[in-house]
Amino acid sequence: MKKFKSAITGNLDIFIAQNEDECDGEILKWQDILIHGDPEGLKSLATLLIKLANTNQNDIIDLPIGAREHIHLRPKYDLSNSSEQVILGRLDAKGTGIFYDRFIPKK
């Protein structure tokens, strides 16, 4: 069996913070996704993101039309033990360029 080699080097910690604050008698709740890393970990994440952005999805034979290339980052293998699992993916679908339905563009 081939040993898994992560594309992430260095240290990365990715987690969700639950936030709550009171403003004018109203409780506001929100979440933040925090991405922290040492220089090597952040640079390897940046390299991975650039590789994903530059991938020509049409050249990936096993990727069906309408699917999106993506990469899983897993705690204990790619990320710290205290991290959440993360999926980095393309927004545009292979062959169509269509974004998924839940996407709402920024204004």
Image (cartoon, grey):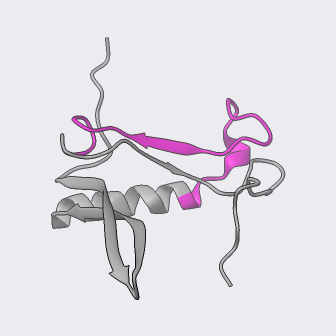
Q: Could you say where residue 29 lies in the image, as x and y percent from the top left?
A: 41, 68
Q: Is residue 106 magenta?
A: no
Is 23 situated left or right of 60 in this image?
left
Between residues 13 and 45, which one lies in front from this camera angle? Answer: 13
Give the residue furthest to the top.
1
What segment is highlighted magenta in the picture?
Answer: 53-79
How many badges with numbers are in the image? 0
Quadrant occupied by the C terminus? bottom right
Asked whether residue 72 is drawn in magenta, I would say yes
> Residue 70: x and y, percent?
55, 44
Image x and y of residue 53, in percent: 56, 61
Q: Residue at x 70, y 33 (%)?
A: 61
Q: Quadrant of the N terminus?
A: top left
Q: Main secondary structure of the magenta part?
A: loop
Q: Residue at x 72, y 41 (%)?
A: 67
- Relative to 39, residue 64 above or below: above
What residue occupies the far front of the structure in this picture? 25
Q: Is residue 91 above or below residue 66?
A: below
Residue 99: image quadrant is bottom right
State the residue at coordinates (82%, 48%).
Answer: 95
Instruction: Using the rendered view, name the quadrant where residue 65 is placed.
Output: top right
Residue 17: quadrant of the picture = bottom left
Above/below status of 53 relative to 67? below
